[in-house]
Amino acid sequence: MFRPEDLIDLARMPMPFGKYRGRVLIDLPQAYLVWFQAKGFPDGRLGRLLALALEVKHNGLSGLVDPLRER
């Protein structure tokens, strides 16, 4: 279940590990998110946010997150 504040986290939270460590979650490449989906998203909050990032990108809604980025 997604919460409204999850969109803020997508726009501000950096990826904590891996090839894209430090990149904001919504800025992760869609192919990377699809790979995670196939392998299984991590448990917990990070996995939920990665799944949401994929859903947002898949539906072409990334622009809705832009106003939530830190300035």
Image: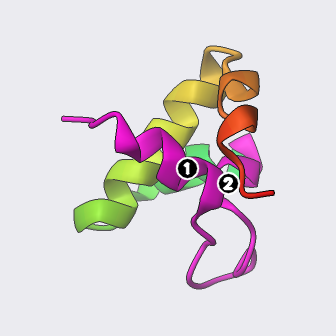
Q: How far apart are marks 2 and 1 (CA)?
A: 15 Å
Residue at figure coordinates x 43%, y 58% from the top left: 39
**Dot 2 lies on which element?**
helix
Q: How many marks?
A: 2
Establish if 20 lies above or below 61. below
Q: Is 66 on the left-hand or right-hand side of 5?
A: right
What mark, if any, has residue 32 been given in the picture? Answer: 2
| Colour mapping used in the image | rainbow
Report the amino acid beneath label 1.
Leu
Quadrant for the N terminus, please.
top left
Q: State the residue lying farthest toward the top.
A: 59
* Residue at the disc numbered 1: 10
Residues in magenta? 1-30
- Residue 8 sits inside the magenta stretch: yes
Quadrant for the C terminus, please.
bottom right
What mark, if any, has residue 56 been given in the picture? Answer: none
Q: Going from the N terminus, do you reach mark 2 or mark 1 first? A: 1
**Dot 1 lies on which element?**
helix
Residue at figure coordinates x 62%, y 60% from the top left: 12
Q: Can residue 41 be seen in this view?
A: no
In this view, the residue in front, 71 or 13, is 71
The crowding category of the residue bearing disc 2, from other C-alpha atoms within 10 Å (few below 14, some 14 to 19, many at least 20), is some
- Residue 19 sits inside the magenta stretch: yes
Image x and y of residue 27, in percent: 76, 51
In this view, the residue in front, 59 or 11, is 11
The crowding category of the residue bearing disc 1, from other C-alpha atoms within 10 Å (few below 14, some 14 to 19, many at least 20), is many
Residue at figure coordinates x 70%, y 81% from the top left: 21
Image x and y of residue 5, in percent: 37, 44
Report the amino acid beneath label 2.
Tyr
Image x and y of residue 64, in percent: 67, 23
Establish if 21 lies above or below 53. below
Residue 30 in which image quadrant? top right
